[in-house]
């Protein structure tokens, strides 16, 4: 869906992006992970041509974006940023309707779409439609931002540190919301973050950037695996990497059949990390898995995980 | 906070109350050419009632400054005092003029002027302490004075007689003044608006534009008008079509161009500041949604900066009204014509007849644009 | 800095040379204004006009500074707080009255000559200076004055060693505005009989002599620009208007 081919960018003396090549398949949520200044935002903003690459090209559905009128291009790509950027002089509904209006939809269709989207991001349309952005909390504003990005049903969504300014509880709530929406709508999403946990919570694939270079790319497990270069592991926090890896593994995949009497119960869909935390909390050496068949996960399975 | 009101307003209220008794209420002259002498305030019932009302209003101002606060009460009291004083002067003048002496004239004396000035200052002080501007109450005082005049209360004042005698001339000068200031404002806008938009993207344009505009500020207006006369005259004589359009070395053209040149700095600065109100991430979000540069300008930058831009327009409008006074020197007309006529004849009535409408105009322009900016929907 | 001073000196020399040459340059003026019979202004020496222009405007600025700066200091002392809203209000009111109106209004009281102009000059010079003094001193961060108090400085020492030095840039900017305004208003004062570089402009306008107008306007503008440059040089680079 999105493909970067030997993309570079330099600002005067500074080489912000150096020869990056990789692709994001259709329907995949890909997280661009890296420290600030690693070039990840620059790369993201080349997709909707807010920045033009100084070398290489960016393809969208096989077409070079350089050949598409930037305004037409952007109207077909959802865009969410950290500061949300809601227009303070327009109501929530008007904000969400920005792109449909640019595309010339009729009023009835826009109104229906706005209500549907507000409901989808968890905001009661009747209550929020007419509100001004200044009256929203940070989390609510970002929900509106997400609805605005999805308004014209674009196949691709670009998200630049969308949850970084939110408090941890709100952030987790919105991450879950994004996963649900992604599962339901099957959009191709490219999301930039510097937060390893967020990357693991969201990503189908992770691309790690360091000093303008792509240093690792693939499914989370592979990226966090032992074969990853030491520099990347240091960047991701080598001492906690093993712990992070556990969040990329689903407990069910390692479960053993059989009953575990007295063991605490792990919720469905839990990760290996959740299982470990559960065992630590309860002081047991095994956890029971929810489900039809009797299954359990012993501590040894966690220690032996690849 | 209350203390600040009391400390600042008490001396002003007392001064306003006492100044007319000390420096005189009205002065009477046997005719227009002889110099006026202080006259006692006539002891008729309406006059007594009026000066009593004036004192009550001054005391109300004093009291309001000391008492726990009602918003704007001080300003209302000060304006009431001004109007009561004006009424006292009008009634006093008609009672003081001797019967059967049509040439005799009565004018406010120094004490009355001091009291009016001090009350205007008190209004401004109260407005400043409230965190506002004194435009509206002062405009109310002007309108109230107009109503008193319309009711015939002020007919005996020499200033009003002068105004009635020169009604047509005054109207023409007022119209000319409005024309000069509005067209200069429009001309400045036509130049400043595109340059400001251009300067958004190009720092070079900004430096050049604002640099030139602040260079103009330094040049005395009379010199700038004078410098424009010769080239405009040359232009008009080589292109007769321009002359037919009313362009020439002497007349409104050099004044309008000169005034507009002075407005470029306040307008340019304010427009640019307004266009820059929208924060960078908001603009980025707008561009990211696929808004065209024009849509970003009109849909995001202009609505968000409208308040700041209107503020600049307000400042420029007030300056334009003031600067238009000098247009009379280069034959541009306007209220300055009456002022300079008065200067030539050393006639204070005539000077006042020119100056007072200028003050009223600048207050009205200020109030109108302030009201307009209050109509703007706020973002919050 | 040095280069700018050199250019300024050159500009001043050129200005004086032009003042000297103007009455001699009959040929130039008659070439520009062939219809004017006596195009060179020779009634008075340009140097006399310049001298009285400078004396009037700089003298008034000095007077304004002597009134405005102490008043501004007083308004920032705790005992003078009451003065503050009056200062702000007077400033607001004065801005809606053009200086020429003040000159005109003062004329019947003070008569023709320099007096009404001087009054307007002092009024319009003192207010911005007063305001600049107040803003300058108030812009000194509270923790700095606190620290000065903590170090045991007396109120007078705090004023002269901490507040005024820190307020200097704002004060100098105010002084620059006051002098610029003073030079410009002096030129208008020619209407009320003040002798200055504006006098030939007024004489030219009343006698339909555009050559006088041009000469007067040229030299008035030149003087204003020179003084502004000089003041910005004195005030340092950070105080451009």
Image: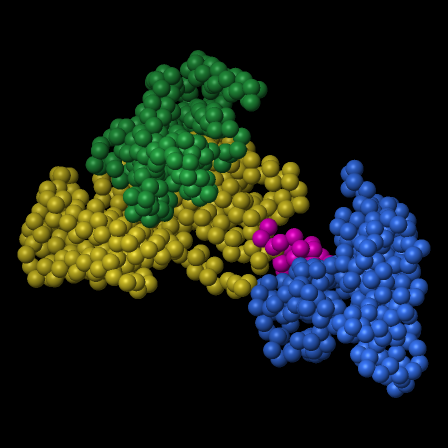
Chain colours: A blue, B yellow, C green
Query: Is C8 drawn above or below residue A173 in the view shown?
Result: above
Residue A162 % position (x, y)? 72, 62
The majority secondary structure of the magenta stretch comes to: helix
Q: Which x, y percent locates residue B108?
A: 17, 48
Instruction: Point out the image quarter for the N terminus of chain C.
Output: top right
Q: Give the side of residue B53 with respect to residue C103, left or right.
A: left
Name the residue located 17 percent from the left edge and 52 percent from the top edge.
B17
Image position, residue C10 (x, y; %): 52, 17
Magenta residues (range) = B276-300
Residue occupying the point 79% across, 59% down: A196
Give the quadrant of residue C207. top left
The mark tally for this picture is: 0
Q: Is residue A250 magenta?
A: no
In-front residue for pair C96/A164: A164
Pick whichever, A202 or B208, lies toward us: A202
Q: Could you tell me if residue A54 is visible in this image?
A: yes
């Amino acid at each position: 869906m999105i493909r970067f081919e030997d993309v570079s960018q330099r600002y005067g003396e500074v080489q912000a992006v150096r020869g990056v090549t990789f692709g994001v398949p259709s329907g995949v949520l890909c997280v661009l992970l890296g420290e600030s200044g690693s070039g990840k935002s620059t790369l993201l903003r080349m997709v909707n041509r807010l920045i033009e690459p100084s070398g290489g090209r960016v393809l969208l559905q096989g077409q070079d974006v350089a050949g598409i009128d930037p305004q037409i291009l952007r109207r077909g790509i959802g865009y969410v940023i950290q500061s949300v950027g809601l227009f303070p002089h327009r109501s929530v509904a008007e904000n969400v309707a920005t792109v449909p209006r640019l595309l010339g939809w009729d009023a009835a269709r826009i109104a229906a779409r706005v209500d549907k989207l507000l409901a989808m991001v968890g905001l009661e349309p009747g209550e929020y439609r007419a509100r001004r952005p200044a009256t929203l909390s940070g989390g609510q504003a970002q929900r509106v931002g997400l609805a605005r990005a999805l308004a014209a049903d674009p196949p691709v969504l670009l998200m630049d540190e969308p949850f970084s300014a939110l408090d941890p509880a709100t952030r987790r709530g919105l991450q879950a919301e994004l996963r649900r929406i992604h599962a339901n709508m099957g959009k191709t999403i490219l999301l930039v973050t510097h937060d390893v946990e967020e990357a693991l919570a969201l990503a189908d694939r992770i691309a790690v950037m360091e000093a303008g270079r792509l240093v690792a790319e693939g499914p989370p497990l592979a990226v966090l695996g032992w074969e990853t270069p030491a520099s990347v592991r240091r960047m991701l926090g080598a001492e906690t990497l093993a712990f992070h890896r556990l969040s990329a593994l689903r407990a069910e995949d390692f479960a053993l059949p059989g009953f575990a009497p007295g063991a605490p119960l792990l919720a469905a869909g839990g990760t290996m990390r959740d299982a470990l935390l559960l065992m630590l909390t309860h002081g047991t050496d095994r956890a029971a898995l929810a489900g039809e068949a009797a299954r359990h996960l012993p501590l040894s399975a966690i220690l032996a995980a690849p | 906070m209350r203390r600040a009101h009391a400390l600042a307003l008490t001396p002003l209220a007392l001064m306003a109350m006492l100044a007319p008794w000390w420096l005189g209420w009205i002065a009477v002259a046997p005719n227009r050419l002889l110099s006026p002498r202080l006259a006692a305030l006539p002891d008729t019932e309406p006059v007594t009632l009026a000066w009593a009302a004036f004192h009550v209003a001054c005391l109300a101002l004093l009291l309001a400054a000391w008492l726990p606060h009602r918003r704007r009460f001080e300003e209302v009291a000060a304006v009431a005092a001004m109007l009561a004083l004006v009424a006292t002067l009008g009634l006093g003048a008609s009672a003081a003029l001797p019967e059967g002496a049509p040439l005799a004239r009565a004018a406010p004396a120094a004490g009355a002027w001091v009291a009016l000035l001090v009350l205007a200052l008190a209004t401004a002080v109260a407005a400043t302490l409230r965190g506002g501007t004194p435009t509206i109450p002062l405009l109310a005082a002007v309108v109230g004075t107009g109503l008193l005049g319309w009711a015939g209360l002020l007919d005996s004042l020499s200033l009003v007689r002068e105004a009635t005698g020169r009604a047509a001339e005054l109207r023409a000068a007022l119209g000319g003044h409005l024309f000069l200031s509005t067209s200069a404002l429009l001309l400045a806008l036509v130049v400043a608006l595109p340059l400001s938009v251009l300067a958004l993207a190009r720092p070079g344009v900004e430096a050049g534009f604002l640099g030139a505009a602040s260079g103009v500020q330094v040049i005395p207006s009379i010199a700038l008008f004078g410098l424009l006369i010769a080239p405009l005259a040359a232009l008009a004589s080589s292109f007769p079509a321009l002359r037919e359009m009313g362009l020439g070395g002497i007349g409104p053209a050099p004044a309008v161009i000169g005034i507009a040149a002075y407005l470029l700095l306040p307008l340019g600065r304010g427009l640019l500041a307004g266009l820059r109100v929208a924060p960078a991430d908001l603009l980025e979000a707008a561009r990211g949604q696929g808004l065209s540069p024009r849509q970003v300008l009109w849909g995001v930058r202009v609505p968000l900066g409208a308040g700041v831009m209107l503020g600049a327009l307000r400042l420029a409008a007030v300056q334009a009204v003031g600067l238009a006074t000098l247009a009379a020197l280069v034959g541009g007309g306007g209220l300055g014509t009456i002022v300079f006529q008065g200067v030539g004849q050393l006639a204070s009535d005539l000077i006042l007849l020119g100056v007072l409408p200028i003050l009223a105009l600048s207050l009205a322009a200020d109030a109108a644009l302030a009201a307009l900016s209050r109509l703007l929907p706020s973002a919050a | 800095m040095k280069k700018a001073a050199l250019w300024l000196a050159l500009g001043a020399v050129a200005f004086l040379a032009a003042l000297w040459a103007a009455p001699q340059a009959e040929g130039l003026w008659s070439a520009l204004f062939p219809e004017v019979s006596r195009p060179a202004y020779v009634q008075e020496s340009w140097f006399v006009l310049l001298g009285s222009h400078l004396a009037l405007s700089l003298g008034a600025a000095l007077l304004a500074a002597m009134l405005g700066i102490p008043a501004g200091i007083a308004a920032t002392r705790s005992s003078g707080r009451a003065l503050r809203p009056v200062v702000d209000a007077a400033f607001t009111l004065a801005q809606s009255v053009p200086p020429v109106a003040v000159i005109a209004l003062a004329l019947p009281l003070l008569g023709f000559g320099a007096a009404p102009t001087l009054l307007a000059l002092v009024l319009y010079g003192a207010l911005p200076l007063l305001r600049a003094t107040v803003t300058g001193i108030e812009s000194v961060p509270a923790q700095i004055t606190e620290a000065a108090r903590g170090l045991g400085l007396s109120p007078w020492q705090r004023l002269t060693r901490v507040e005024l030095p820190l307020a200097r840039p704002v004060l100098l900017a105010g002084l620059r505005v006051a002098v610029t305004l003073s030079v410009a208003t002096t030129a208008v004062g020619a209407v009320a009989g003040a002798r200055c570089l504006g006098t030939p402009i007024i004489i030219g306008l009343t006698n339909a002599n555009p050559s006088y107008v041009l000469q007067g306007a040229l030299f008035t503008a030149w003087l204003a620009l020179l003084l502004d440059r000089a003041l910005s040089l004195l005030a340092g680079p950070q105080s451009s208007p």
